[in-house]
Image: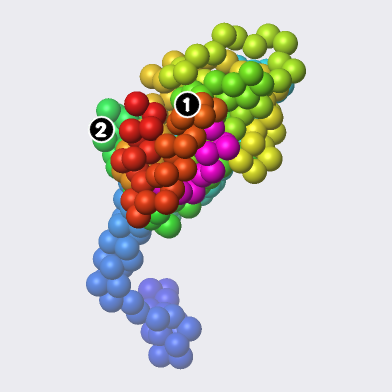
Amino acid sequence: MEDNLEKSIMGKIKTGQVKIRSKYVFIAEKLGLGTAFALSVLLSILLFNLILFYLKETDNLKYLSFGKFGVFAFLESFPYLLVIAFVVLIVLSGYLITKSDVSYKKPFGYLAVGLAAFIMIFGGILTYTNLGKNFEKQARKGNGSIGMFFNPLTEVRNNGVAGIVYEVGEDSLVLQTPHGLRNVEIGGIDDLPEITKGQFIIAVGKSDGFDFKAEKIKIADKEDMPAVERGIDFKFNQGEVDPKDFSPSMFYFNEEEKKCVQNCLDLENGKDCFRECRE
């Protein structure tokens, strides 16, 4: 019986029906599987950390406080690509587990729960580091690969705006935002809070180029959305906003200030001159 089995196996080997593989091939496959699994888990931890960072540091979740008025602003500013990439990596990690020896020793359900807990715990721990801020800074500097994931943070929103009040007019405001100065029309808002220069506000409504027609406005605490404050600081304090890009008519300057600003526009470098006009 054993002789017949041996002859049958040897015959299949000779005819090519069964191929002998080197033990080194098996070792290489295991190493490759282990490396792919480790890489997918590490990337999952990183993306989970960035999702937490985005939701905690930006104005995204704050739009939900406006009720139905803030839903579109929330959906527009949600980090879809980060979440999709995270889900794909989680699925990939689970699939790689099923291909490993571990899946034969433990039920897949236990392994999946353990993997998810591991990723969330270590992703949460990373929120206490500056990793998220470093990625945010690179995105604001124009790093395309990182900016792709932080696109809602670095792009102008059509349904929401947050920033520091720069000028207050009768029916409109000028806000400093991470994307530059925005004119916010506030006429027609019934429950408008008392707004003063220097306050941090968040509004929902509809964008029309430079203008933003607000439907609801709330005075906010800048500590609740520090990424917006950092974006404003990056935009205005690192020389990225040139007064020459704006007409004096956009601001609520008095006549003396308008003349000063107009003179600044004729200079080679009007940034310092522009600041002096406001002092």
Residue 216 or 99: which is nearer the viewer? 216
Q: Is label 2 or label 1 in front?
A: 1
Circle number at residue 177:
none
Q: What residue would you read off at disc 1?
A: 166
Find residue 279 and report its horizontal and vertical position in percent. 34, 26
Residue at x-position 54% and y-position 43%:
247
Can you see residue 198?
yes
Q: Quadrant of the N terminus?
A: bottom left
In this rendering, position of residue 209 left or right of residue 262: right
In this rendering, position of residue 186 left or right of residue 56: right
The amino acid type found where label 2 is placed reads Thr
Q: CA distance from mark 2 to mark 1?
A: 32 Å
> Disc 2 or 1, which lies upstream in sequence?
2
Find residue 3 and report its horizontal and vertical position in percent. 37, 79
Residue 273 or 103: which is nearer the viewer? 273
Rendered position, 73 above or below 273? above
Whether the magenta-drawn stretch holds residue 244 is answered as yes
Find residue 217 and report its horizontal and vertical position in percent. 61, 18
Residue at x-position 27% and y-position 28%:
128
Residue at x-position 45% and y-position 31%:
257
Question: Number of marks in the image?
Answer: 2
Q: Secondary structure at mark 1?
A: strand
Local crowd at mark 1 within 10 Å, few (<14), some, or many (≥20)? many
Can you see residue 106?
no
Residue 41 or 131: which is nearer the viewer? 131
Rendered position, 39 above or below 76? below
Local crowd at mark 2 within 10 Å, few (<14), some, or many (≥20)? few
Q: Secondary structure at mark 2?
A: loop
Rendered position, 203 above or below 16? above
The amino acid type found where label 1 is placed reads Tyr
What stretch of residues is rendered in magenta? 241-251
Circle number at residue 129:
2
